[in-house]
């Protein structure tokens, strides 16, 4: 993830002053797994517990969605995104949508 | 060879019981590991307030995310479906979701600890069911839990 853009899920960037609010930015990603992993997850269903393959898949998808949101914010000339929210929804069997949204801002250093 | 017929008939039940008991053992081990890691990461405080009320000198901040996907086993599914007849607490699912939430929070804390954070503010925990097929009513539920918050790093 980019180091030059600040992400927070509060209304401010702690320790910085916000100069300008640019508006809503968003990113989404829908991922499906290949069938081999689906079968492995099906087997894991026998004993229950964590499904590592799905956890990995969803965190990859989340990183991609976040990256898209960051690209969107950069296009607007922002250097920070505040009030970031994550949402997950299932669209079909074996696929999930990850959605990230926030408000792009321009911040300046404190006096 | 007459004894083999009831065995064939009972084999799915025996397998479900066997895997279910294995699942319970794994659950116990996971709980022990959660308690151990919670003790290590105790120094990072978390709050779901939007502001930090401990007058920390803030140097830097970053977004931290932890997520986990968890599934129940068929023994639990069977026990839960029995429970729906009489109503009441579904204990096996309560344990499962509590485990998932604590694991997600721990992963978020571990990410914050890697960045030497002192406090995580505005923690949000979100649960969603994924991969639920409309055609399979009795499908095993898969639950994803995300925990995220803003980690504050104090100036030293």
Image (cartoon, rainbow, N blue to C red):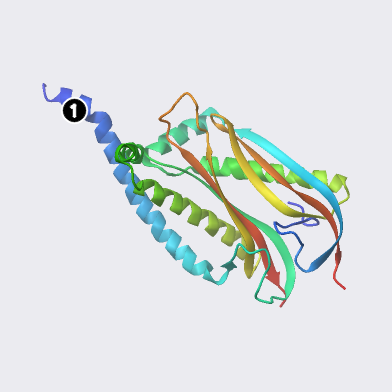
Q: Position of residue A16 (x, y in %)?
A: 81, 66
User: Label 1, on which residue?
Assistant: B7
Q: Quadrant of residue B116?
A: bottom right
Q: Where is residue B74 in the image (x, y as percent from the top left)?
A: 35, 37
Screen quadrant of the C terminus of chain A? bottom right
Q: Tell me how many marks there are.
A: 1
Q: In which quarter of the image is residue B117?
A: bottom right
Element class at badge 1:
helix
Q: Where is residue A85 in the image (x, y as percent from the top left)?
A: 68, 49
Residue drawn where x is 27% and y is 30% of the image: B12
Q: Does B91 sit above or below residue B115? A: above
* Residue sitting farthest toward the left: B2
Residue drawn where x is 75% and y is 66% of the image: A14
Q: Does B98 sit above or below residue A12? A: above
Q: Between B118 and A15, which is closer to the camera in this rendering?
A: A15
Locate residue B88 relative to residue B114 in the image: left or right: left
Disc 1 crowd, CA 10 A, few/some/many (<14, 14-19, 20+): few
Locate residue A88 relative to residue B17 in the image: left or right: right
Residue drawn where x is 55% and y is 72% of the image: B43
Q: Where is residue B27 in the image (x, y as percent from the top left)?
A: 37, 51
Residue drawn where x is 50% and y is 26% of the image: B134
Q: Between A84 and B30, which is closer to the camera in this rendering?
A: A84
Q: Between B51 and B107, which is closer to the camera in this rendering?
A: B51
Chain under disc 1:
B
């Amino acid at each position: 993830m980019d180091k030059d853009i600040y992400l927070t899920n509060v209304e401010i960037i702690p320790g910085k002053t916000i100069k300008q609010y640019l508006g809503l930015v968003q990113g989404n990603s829908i991922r499906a797994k290949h069938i081999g992993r689906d079968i492995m997850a099906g087997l894991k269903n026998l004993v229950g517990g964590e499904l590592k393959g799905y956890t990995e898949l969803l965190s990859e998808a989340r990183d991609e969605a976040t990256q898209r949101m960051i690209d969107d914010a950069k296009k607007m000339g922002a250097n920070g995104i505040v009030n970031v929210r994550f949402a997950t929804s299932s669209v079909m069997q074996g696929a999930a949508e990850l959605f990230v949204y926030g408000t792009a801002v321009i911040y300046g250093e404190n006096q | 060879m007459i004894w083999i017929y009831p065995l064939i008939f009972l084999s799915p039940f025996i397998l479900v019981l066997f895997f279910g008991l294995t699942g319970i053992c794994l659950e116990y081990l996971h709980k022990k590991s959660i308690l151990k890691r919670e003790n290590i990461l105790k120094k990072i405080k978390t709050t779901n307030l939007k502001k930090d009320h401990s007058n920390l000198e803030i140097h830097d901040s970053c977004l931290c995310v932890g997520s986990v996907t968890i599934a129940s086993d068929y023994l639990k599914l069977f026990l839960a479906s029995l429970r729906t007849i009489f109503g009441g607490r579904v204990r096996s699912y309560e344990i499962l979701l509590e485990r998932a939430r604590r694991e997600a929070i721990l992963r978020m804390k571990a990410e914050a600890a890697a960045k030497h954070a002192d406090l995580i503010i505005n923690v949000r925990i979100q649960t969603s069911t994924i991969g639920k097929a409309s055609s399979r009513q009795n499908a095993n539920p898969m639950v994803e839990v995300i925990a995220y918050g803003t980690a504050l790093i104090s100036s030293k």
